[in-house]
Amino acid sequence: MKLTFSPASPFARKVRIAAIELGLIDKIEFVPAAVTPGTANEDYSKITPLKKLPVLITNDGDVILDSYVIVEYLNEMAGGSLIPDYGPRRWKAKTNHSLINGMLDSMLLCRYEKMVRPQGLQWQAWSDDHWNRAWTGMARFENMPEVLNGPFDISQIGLVCVLGYADFRFADCGWRKAYPKLDAFHQKMLERPSVKISVPPAA
């Protein structure tokens, strides 16, 4: 299998963590890809018109989009337990992950607004609104012991990627001081080889 990725992408990191945990990391070839907004990449657009990372290309040549769907595919392939099979726990995990993905989307948009949009064209209120979505999402997880202390699953993997991306791109945001339970959770998660190995490179 092939996975398009960037070491900086929290979405690709999510898949890398899952692949390590499921024992599939050696079956995946990692293919670097660049998807900077405003920059054409016709070759990558042929793989996915959305130009988003990551994409999994199976051994049969099928293209699987979206980090959650890729993790679900790998989890099924390995007979894993990263995503509950059925019932209330499954829908809770999917809902938590939807919130996490939205938080990552908002953080990525804040990054683009500051670093990619031409000077003089930034919209501060728009950026503040998106940052607030991520920040209040952290506040919600701060008060969700069932996630912080629960089994290692897609919710915990996604939350690790949110906090790691905050460190990577928003190092001065102060999330640790604001959310001590998330800080303790993150420190505990860094003891897992899959989480530690996949930490983004220094910005």
Image (tube, rainbow, N blue to C red):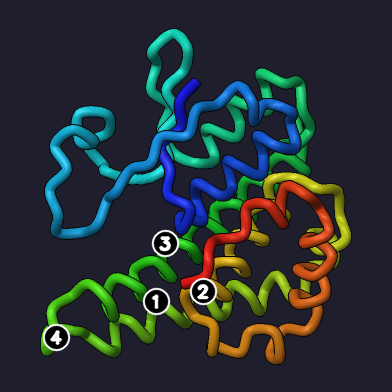
Whole-angstrom CA distance, mark 1 to mark 2, is 7 Å
Residue 78 in picture, x, y percent from top left:
72, 21
Q: Earlier in the sequence, mark 4 or mark 2?
A: 4
For residue 92, say whether it is visible.
no
Q: Quadrant of residue 56?
A: top left
Give the number of the mark in front: 4 or 1: 4
For residue 38, say whether it is visible.
yes
Whole-angstrom CA distance, mark 3 to mark 2, is 9 Å
Q: Which mark is residue 105?
A: 3
> Given the image, on which type of amino acid does mark 2 rest?
Ala
> Given the image, on which type of amino acid does mark 4 rest?
Gln
Q: Earlier in the sequence, mark 3 or mark 4?
A: 3
Q: Which mark is residue 134?
A: 2
Residue 124 in picture, x, y percent from top left:
27, 89
Q: Mark 4 near mark 1, Cβ–Cβ under 8 Å?
A: no
**Foreground residue among 123 and 170:** 170
Q: Is residue 165 above or below residue 57?
A: below
Residue 133 in picture, x, y percent from top left:
48, 75
Q: Would you say 14 lies left or right of 119 here?
A: right
Q: Which mark is residue 119?
A: 4
Q: Earlier in the sequence, mark 3 or mark 1?
A: 3
Location of mark 1 (residue): 130
Q: Residues within 10 Å of mark 4 (few under 14, many from 20)?
A: few
Q: Mark 1 near mark 2, Cβ–Cβ under 8 Å?
A: yes
Q: Mark 3 near mark 4, Cβ–Cβ under 8 Å?
A: no
Q: Quadrant of residue 177?
A: bottom right
Q: Residue at x 59, y 72 (%)?
A: 137
Whole-angstrom CA distance, mark 4 to mark 1, is 19 Å
Q: Is residue 45 above or below residue 114?
A: above
Q: Residue at x 72, y 84 (%)?
A: 179
